[in-house]
Amino acid sequence: MADGGPGAAYTHLGVHGPRSRTATMPRGLLLPDVDPTPEFARWIDSLGYDSVWASELWGRDAFVTLAAIAPHTDAALGTAIVNVFSRSPAVLAGAATSLDDLASGPIRLGIGPSTPKAIEDLHGLGYDRPVRRLHETAELVSAFTAGEGRVEYDGELFSVQDFPALDGEVSVYAAALGEASRRATGRTADGWLPHMIPFDDLEGAFETVRRTAREAGRDPALAVSPYVPAAVDDEPEKAREVIRGHVAYYVGSGEGYRRAVAGRFPEEAERITEAWAAGERERARGAVTGAMVDALGVAGTPAEARERFEAVAETVPITEPIVVVPSNASEGMTERTIEALAP
């Protein structure tokens, strides 16, 4: 970011002036891992992103991060993602509605089952029935934030009796890769947050969501907000190398991601997984082909990246792509990518 470290002074604030939200395809931004200072928040807001999302794994709380951003933007605020194991549905609903009290725009609660590694080794919990937990959490959060009535719920994992619903403008988005979790998304969620599904395969994957929603008597027109890993540099190969590192990390360390990528790149996914498991990170990154970079991310000069991002944004069934700068990008590349792909 600016000199002085991540989230520092942002002396270039105001160069572009305030921008209205885009009148074309809306787009979101996943916040980089920086301190959410008021200066940083105002800079992000000046770029005109329609939604701002915060991730959470270890070290940062997504709701606290978004609470710091909320006073400085009227964009939608979203979690991308919080897991469904470490907080109960009631706690998630309370956090989302508390954030709604601070925010000018709507709240998008992005939830997902995470991975056995995170849930078992970090939280010390059993990774038990993740799809069912996703399903019941989405249903219960929707009931808890409905704004009226008292919540009664008798599920397989959760049972709730006689608590009043909270009033909040909260939509539930599910991060779902496999078919079972996509069916749960169609049955319960307002939106879908895919990641590491090749862009050209999204329409086929979304058909499961759409069909299940219809079968459940729900509106099949769910929002679709995929992560779009993106990197910009005057030397395109530097940007592409950042995307290679991002793909290698997710394919190598997460079975769900590996399966999502292997649908189109089976041999490449296997090579990446083998190298990663052997601790050979450089070999894993080298196994990410140019075709994989193009299918799973956006990389190049600012002009090239903007053109590619616009093409991805128009891919059916995407409704609002999310710009995600990989964590292995430099601070300067991160800032430049956020600016280059802003509305």
Image (cartoon, rainbow, N blue to C red):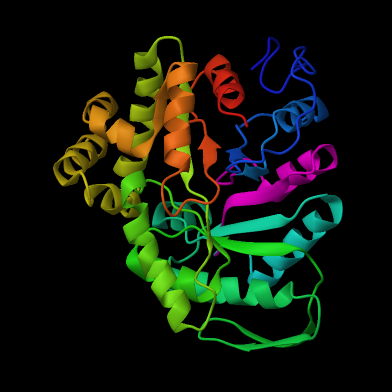
x 52%, y 36%: residue: 324
Which sits in the foreground, 171 or 127?
A: 171
Q: Residue 210, percent across and down? A: 43, 69
Q: Which quarter of the figure has residue 33?
A: top right
Q: Residue 56, percent across and down? A: 59, 46
Q: Quadrant of the N terminus?
A: top right
Which sits in the foreground, 134 or 188?
A: 188
The relative height of residue 147 versus residue 68 in the rendered view (above or below) is below
x 39%, y 61%: residue: 206
x 43%, y 60%: residue: 176
Let me know if residue 78 is in the magenta part: yes
Magenta range is 55-84
Q: Quadrant of the C terminus?
A: top right
Let me know if residue 225 is in the magenta part: no
Q: Is 203 displayed left or right of 339 in the figure?
A: left
The relative height of residue 94 versus residue 13 in the rendered view (above or below) is below
Task: Decide if residue 274 is in sight here.
Answer: yes
Which sits in the foreground, 257 or 50?
A: 50
The relative height of residue 259 versus residue 249 in the rendered view (above or below) is below
Q: Is 81 displayed left or right of 310 in the figure?
A: right
Task: Decide if residue 288 is in sight here.
Answer: no
